[in-house]
Every structure is written in structure tokens, then in C-alpha cells.
Image (cartoon, rainbow, N blue to C red):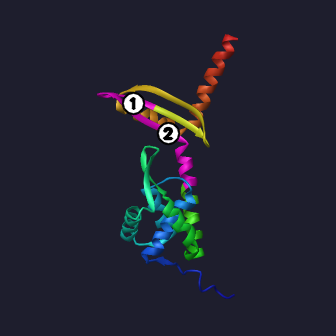
Amino acid sequence: MKKNIWENVYYRLKDPVEIKLAVLYVIFYADIPVSDVELKHCMLEGTSVDFLLLCDVIEQLLEENHIKTVWRDEADKYVLTPSGEDMISMFENKLLVSVKSSLKASVDAYYKNESTRKSIRCDLVPLAENSFQVNLELKEGKHSLFTLALFAGSKERALVMCRRFRENPYGFYESISDFLVREADKEA
């Protein structure tokens, strides 16, 4: 059986222009505002690129006004400007198909894992010195199953509450639902 000689060849992005196009492509393909960490993760996962060169290219894109930062989900995130959209639409065909497919796979994998992680949220909120509350949220897709704020007292107790919630969020949800339904059944 003849072995495919191209099977282990990995294309390394070295040209700053190619890297710029790849960065613009990631933001374009994600189709949502992308944080600095998310962008770098997808680029490093999907291509072979020097990290310092990648950081320089991102700064250049900001200076050239091809991308800009916006405040979303309590963080600065990158979006394409009209000139960035024009640039990627005109020169997308200059990126190798293998690079584009690798970047697509990286973005898809990242946001698949990220959406699962974001479906469970537990935040510690300081109320006063050594006094905390925990905010719990469980989502199914874009829909919130429940949101709950509980006074925890000490930080240690708040951390325990968050850890227990993360261990079994759906069990917690079912317990609350069962409790509320049982109480409603008793009243009826």
C-alpha cells in the first residue's frame, strides 16, 4: 500500500500578511466578538504560528483599524471593522484551503467546549468584609433553566457551595424543582 507523502506536512504561517488574513478569518468565521485569549487559542490550535509574531500582528490590525475592541460579557473582545470585513472578503481566497479548514475546526471545537462550560455559572459576590453571596445559573442552550442568589456568609462557605453546585448542577435543579412541586402539591 502506497503511503500518502503529504500526510505529515504541516503548513507554518510565517508571512505577516498571511497571519493577518488568518486572524481576520477567525473573527469572521466565529461571527461573534472574540476575546484576545479565544483568538490566540484558535490561531495556535489551528495553525503553526509564532506566538510573538501573532501578538504583533494583532496589534497591527488594531492600529490599522481592521479590528476593534468592544465590551461584551464583561470583557474586551475583537470584532471586524468595515475595512477588516472588506479585507477578508477580498483576500480570503489567498489563504490556503487547509489553513481555513484547520481554523474552522479550531473555532468550532473551542466554542463547542466553551458553550458547555458557560451553561453552568457560579459567581462569588462580596457583600461586605468576609460576607459573600453566590449567584448560581444553569442554562440549556440560550435559555436559562434557573438563576439563584444565595447568601453564603464566609468565603469558605461560598466556595463550598459553588464546588457542590458545579459537581451536580442538574441534580441541584431537580431537587429545587421537586421541592417546589411537592410544596405546591401539599397546598392543593
Tell me the residue at 31%/28% (across/down).
130
Measured as percent of width and height from the top left, residue 174 is found at 62, 30
- Image coordinates of residue 165 in percent, x first then y, are 50, 35
Question: In the rendered image, which residue does mark 2 sit on?
Answer: 121
Q: Quadrant of residue 105?
A: bottom right
Residue 92 occupies which quadrant of the picture? bottom right
* Placement of the C terminus among the 4 image quadrants: top right
- The one of 143 and 21 positioned closer to us in this rendering: 21
Is 159 a magenta residue? no
Disc 2 residue type (three-letter): Arg
Disc tally is 2
Q: Is residue 115 left or right of residue 129?
A: right
Of 42 and 123, the residue lying toward us: 42
Q: Which mark is residue 34?
A: none
- Dot 2: few (<14), some (14–19), or many (≥20) neighbours within 10 Å? some
Q: Nearer the viewer, residue 134 or 37?
A: 37
**Does 182 appear above or below 149?**
above
Mark 1 lies on a secondary structure that is helix
Residue 140 pos. (x, y %) = 62, 40
Give the quarter of the image for residue 138.
Answer: top right
Q: Are marks 1 and 2 in contact (CB under 8 Å)?
A: no
Span colored in magenta? 111-134
Above or below — where is 29 with respect to 140? below
Q: Residue furthest left?
A: 129
Q: Amino acid at mark 1?
A: Arg
Residue at left offset 53%, top offset 45%:
118
Sequence-wise, the earlier of marks 1 and 2 is: 2
Around disc 1, counting alpha carbons within 10 Å, would you say few (fewer than 14), some (14 to 19), or many (20 or more)?
Answer: some
- Please check the rendered image and state whether residue 127 is part of the magenta-colored stretch, yes or no: yes
User: Dot 1 corresponds to which residue?
Assistant: 157
